[in-house]
Image: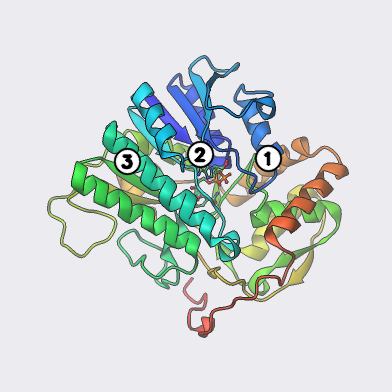
Amino acid sequence: MKLLVTGTAGFIGYHLAKRLAAAGEDIVGLDSINDYYDVRLKYGRLAELGFAGAEQWPEDSALRQSAAYPNLRFIKMNLEDAAALKALFAAEHFDVVINLAAQAGVRYSLTNPDVYIASNIQGFLNVLEAVRAYPVRHLVYASSSSVYGINTIQPFSESGAADHPASLYAVSKRSNELMAHSYSHLYGIPTTGLRFFTVYGPWGRPDMAYFLFAQAIMEGRPIDVFNHGDMRRDFTCIDDIIEGIVRIIGLIPSGVPQWDSIQSGISPAPARVYNIGNGKPVRLLDFIQALETELGREAKKNMLPMQAGDVPATWADCTALERDTGYRPRIEVREGIKRFVEWYRGYYKNEESYTKNEKIDIERFGAPGIIKNEPAYDKQKFPDGRM
Ligand SMILES: NC(=O)c1ccc[n+]([C@@H]2O[C@H](COP(=O)([O-])OP(=O)(O)OC[C@H]3O[C@@H](n4cnc5c(N)ncnc54)[C@H](O)[C@@H]3O)[C@@H](O)[C@H]2O)c1
């Protein structure tokens, strides 16, 4: 089976490419290697995949062979380049496409909305057009728990409302689901969207709270705890996410003819969406405590109000995933954090590299309080009172 995995230099794409390549699948990895966060981390992931020295590559769209896996190749390409993408599909004839490349992050979408339209809407349209021209057996793509927006009925179920987004990032992910559905309906392309819930773990994303917390705790700096710590997240370990994706690849949707014209998440068209989350929301303060335990240092907490675009709680209903794949995420937060901290300590061996990374984060994501475009209505109407 020949698979295209986009976003391979990213957190989830790296882990997936590694798992599939180790299993002997024929893989092409694709990534634009953008500088949204520290690119050294992206080149580090590529080096782990057998592409050491990728930072020295000339600007071309050559397919390069991994030194670690004979069945893995990589191409530096932007999904926004429709012609290049189609040429790749024409040359390779993929059986399965797993689209993980996207502009991620809720906060960044408040200040850089245009990037989300370019990467996540236009880029995804280009993927759909490529699979229309060169049909695949299955298109699997990353959606997000953020599609549930201000929905207050927890746990979040795929059959529930996902039409009240709290950020343009969420809009872009929900739009991907709708775009995929229309292509499944029109052209019979089987598509599955995966709503990931707060993924963490080794080789993670340095813009995410747990990573910023680890950096700050190690440096003795205070950490920003939003909504005064009154947040719950369904933190999901990367290993569980990868197991879920791998099982979904072979689960090709065929449509549900007896659809009641009401329920979300299913369709007579071969289009599905699944939650992949731990199913056990954890209080932010408990998560921080687990980090403190593993890092062996206490956090100085800077309690702040809720951030614009954020939601107070996420909780995945994984009934559908478990029913259809026989799997549900099972790694406890303590174990997941242990795996993350073990990697983190090895990767950032000295204080100097913590500091370098922090500078990039502050430039990118702003110091606390920079984002001030709070919605005008009362967010207290949507409190975290449901769990
Ligand atoms: N990590 C999470 O908690 C989480 C949660 C929900 C959804 N997701 C989604 O999962 C996917 C993977 O997320 P991640 O955490 O690995 O993020 P990531 O930022 O680490 O990886 C995304 C990769 O895509 C690449 N990319 C971005 N735009 C591109 C484009 N136009 N063309 C080619 N490459 C492009 C980036 O360079 C990056 O390496 C994303 O779609 C994200 O929105 C992630």
For the question of whether residue 1 can be seen, the reply is: no
Discs 3, 1 touching: Cβ within 8 Å? no
Find residue 357 and report its horizontal and vertical position in percent.
77, 47
Q: Which mark is residue 39?
A: 1
How crowded is the residue under tag 2: few (<14 C-alpha within 10 Å), some, or many (20+)? many
Type of residue at label 2?
Answer: Asn
Which of discs 3 and 1 lies nearer the camera? The answer is 3
**Residue 317, image quadrant:** bottom left
> What is the C-alpha distance between the residues marked 3 and 1?
29 Å
Q: Could you say which is closer to the camera, residue 186 or residue 83?
A: 83
Q: Which mark is residue 129?
A: 3
Element carrying mark 3: helix
- The residue drawn where x is 24% and y is 45% is 184
How crowded is the residue under tag 3: few (<14 C-alpha within 10 Å), some, or many (20+)? some
Q: Could you say which is closer to the camera, residue 93 or residue 11?
A: 93
Q: Is residue 318 left or right of residue 264?
A: right
Closer to the chain start, of discs 2 and 3, is: 2
- The residue drawn where x is 45% and y is 72% is 150
> What is the C-alpha distance between the residues marked 1 and 2?
15 Å
Type of residue at label 1?
Answer: Val
Q: Which mark is residue 78?
A: 2
Q: Could you say which is closer to the camera, residue 178 or residue 245?
A: 178
Element carrying mark 2: loop
Q: Quadrant of the N terminus?
A: top left
Count of numbered circles in the view = 3
Which of discs 1 and 2 lies nearer the camera? The answer is 2
Q: Could you say which is closer to the camera, residue 154 or residue 18?
A: 18
Q: Is mark 2 within 8 Å of ligand 1?
A: yes
Discs 2, 3 touching: Cβ within 8 Å? no
